Image: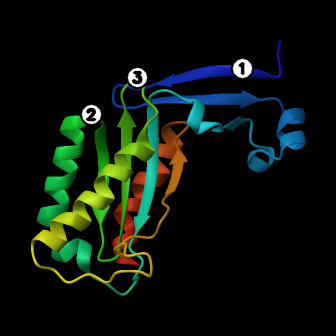
Amino acid sequence: MSEWDIAWFKNPVFRYRCIRATPLAIYHFGLCEGALWCCIGVTAWRGGTYFFTVTLRDRSADTLVRHVGLLRAVFRTVRAERPFTINAIVILPDHLHTLWTLPDGDSGYSGRWRAIKPRFTRQLVQSGIPLDCGHRGEYTLWQRRFWEHALCDDADVQHHADYSHWNPTR
């Protein structure tokens, strides 16, 4: 048996693709600190379910909830162009958490975020909302990156869905 096995977990709602690592490979590559199942190499996967946290640069801003209608419209537009399923989403004043399932054969979640973030920014500017520009002339609404996590199994999905539901109460 090879060091790596590809395994599919199937569920009526979610699909996960994970890689099973032997304990030696986990130790050797520093994966998941002793766990036998580990999601790695997400950029090489096609399809799958992911958890994202996307944050505004100004952590004291309430832009996302104040303009949630514009954000919703941008999500609809991007979903029409590049389909994906939103399994859960929570929008907080300065950041959002969401669980997405991408279609089989598709791993382009970064492209979707590259569409959502600037479109929302443009919608705000076109609506007359004043936004700061950085030294390059770019709007500084969003943090440049986002946090993503490939979800491996039902427990991982449940953990991140619970986190999304309870995060607003913290």
The location of residue 4, given as percent across then percent down, is 76, 23
Q: Nearer the viewer, residue 107 or 159?
A: 107
Which residue is painted at 83% across and 22% down in the image? 3
Secondary structure under the numbered disc 3 in the rendered image: loop
Give residue 42's quadrant in the image: top right
- Residue 39 in the image: state x and y as whole percent: 63, 38
Identify the amino acid type marked 2.
Pro
Image point (45%, 50%), residue name: 51
How far apart marks 3 and 1 lie (CA) works out to 19 Å
What separation in Å lies between label 1 and label 2 (alpha carbons)? 29 Å
Residue 83: mark in rendering? 2
Check disc 1 and report its element: helix, strand or loop.
strand
Measured along the vertical axis of the image, is residue 80 above or below residue 141?
Answer: above
Read off the residue under disc 3: 104
Mark 1 lies on residue: 5
Q: Nearer the viewer, residue 40 or 118?
A: 118
Q: Earlier in the sequence, mark 3 or mark 2?
A: 2
Residue beneath the point at 84% across and 42% down: 29
Q: Would residue 75 be found to the left or right of residue 94 on screen?
A: left
Give, as a three-letter code, the residue at label 3.
Answer: Asp
- CA gap between label 3 and label 2 equals 11 Å
Determine the secondary structure under disc 2: loop
Residue at the extreme front: 136
Q: Tag 2 or tag 1, which sits nearer the N-term?
A: 1
> Quadrant where the C terminus lies?
bottom left
Quarter of the image where the N terminus is located: top right
